[in-house]
Amino acid sequence: MERRKFGTLGAASARARLAVVIPFIALIVAAGEEAQARGARHQAVPAEPRYIPPYADIVVDGNSGAVLHESNPDEPRHPASLTKIMTLYLLFEQLELGALKLDTALPVSPRAAQQHPTKLGLKADTTVTVEDAIGGIVTRSANDAAVVVSEAVGGSEEAFAKLMTAKAHELGMTSTTYVNASGLPADEQITTARDQATLGRAIRARFPNYFPVFSTLSYRYHGVDIHNHNGLLGRVDGVDGIKTGYTDASGYNLISSVHRDDKSIVAVVLGETSNSAREARMRGLIEDGIRQASSQRTGPTILQATRGEATRGEATRGEATRGEATRGQAAKTGEPAGPIGFAPASASSRPVRDNFGK
C-alpha cells in the first residue's frame, strides 16, 4: 500500500511539474514565432532607394568665355523649368521689336489654364498682361503663364517650341531640343550644362534692359506677393539671377549669373538631389569660379562668338523666323510680327516696372 501511495504521489508530482513546464515552453515558442514574423515584416519592406538624378555642372568666365570648371558638361539632361529662360528670351525679342509691350493683354486658353503644378491660377478665356506673365514666370515659375506666352508668340505651344529649338541652335546650343515652353516632363526635351551656360550668357548680353527681372525677389500679383524660388538671390554676393528648375527626371537645376567687382561668371548645376544640395553646390562653384575669373574682357560676348553680331542687343541681319521680324520690317509695316495679332507698340528700352521688387 505504501508503495502504491508513493507511486500515486510521484505521478501527481510529475503532473504538477508538467503543468508548469508546458506553458513555459509555449511562451518560448510563441516568442520565437513573433520574432520570426517581425523579421519577415522587415524583409518585406525594403529601404527606399536614395534619389540620385544624373548630375552635370559648368562654370564659365563671363569676360573671357573660358571654362573654369566642368563635370559632364555635354551629357544630355532634362532642363525642367530652365526651359522658361528660352521662353522669356523669345518674349523679350518681341518686346524689343515693339510687337508686344508690357501692358499688352495676352489671352488665356483653356489649355494654358489647365497647366500644373506651379501656376498663377489663370482662368480660361481671360487675359494676363505681358508684365504679369513675366513676373509669374521668374518668381513662381508659372507653367500657365509660360503656355500663354508660347501661344501668343508662336500661335501654339508646339510651334513655339520649334522656334525655341531654332533659337537655341542659332546661339550654338546644338545639343538642346525643346518640345514645350514650361519644362514639364518630356523625354524629348533635352539640353546640356554647356548649352545652358551659353543661354545664360546670351540672354544677359542680349537683353540688358530685361535681364534684371531674373533678380526679382518677389512679385505682387493680384495683391499677393510671390516669392522667388532661387534662394541665392539676396544671400550670395553678386548673384543677379537667373532661374531654378526641378522635375523627378531632371533633379534640382539652377543657373546663376554673378558679378563681383570687374569679374563675371555664369554657373550651371543640373541634377542635384535636393534644393539645399543645389544651393550648397552652387555656392561652392561661385566662390571657386570668382577666384579664378578674369577681371579683364579678353573674349567676345557670347552673341558675337556664336552668331557674329556686331553689337550687343542687335538682331542678326536678315533673321526672320515665325513670330519674329527684323526691326526694319516692323518699322515699315507698323504691324506685329507673325501670328501675334496685337496692336503694335514702340520698342521698350526701359527695365520692367517697379513691382518687380528687389
Image (spheres, grey):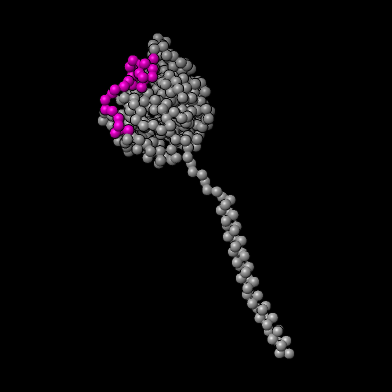
Position of residue 252 relative to residue 326, above or below, is below
Which image quarter: residue 296?
top left
Which image quarter: residue 285?
top left
Residue at x-position 39% and y-position 12%: 317
Position of residue 270 relative to residue 9, above or below, is above
Give the image location of residue 77, x and y in percent. Answer: 47, 31
Residue at x-position 40% and y-position 38%: 278
Residue toward you, 59 or 166: 59
Give the image location of residue 293, x and y in percent. Answer: 30, 30
Residue at x-position 47% and y-position 40%: 52
- The verdict on residue 306 being magenta is yes
Residue toward you, 125 or 298: 298
Quadrant where the N terminus sits is bottom right
Give the image location of residue 4, x and y in percent. Answer: 73, 86
- Stretch in magenta: 289-316
Position of residue 41 relative to residue 149, above or below, is below
Prevailing secondary structure of the magenta residues: loop
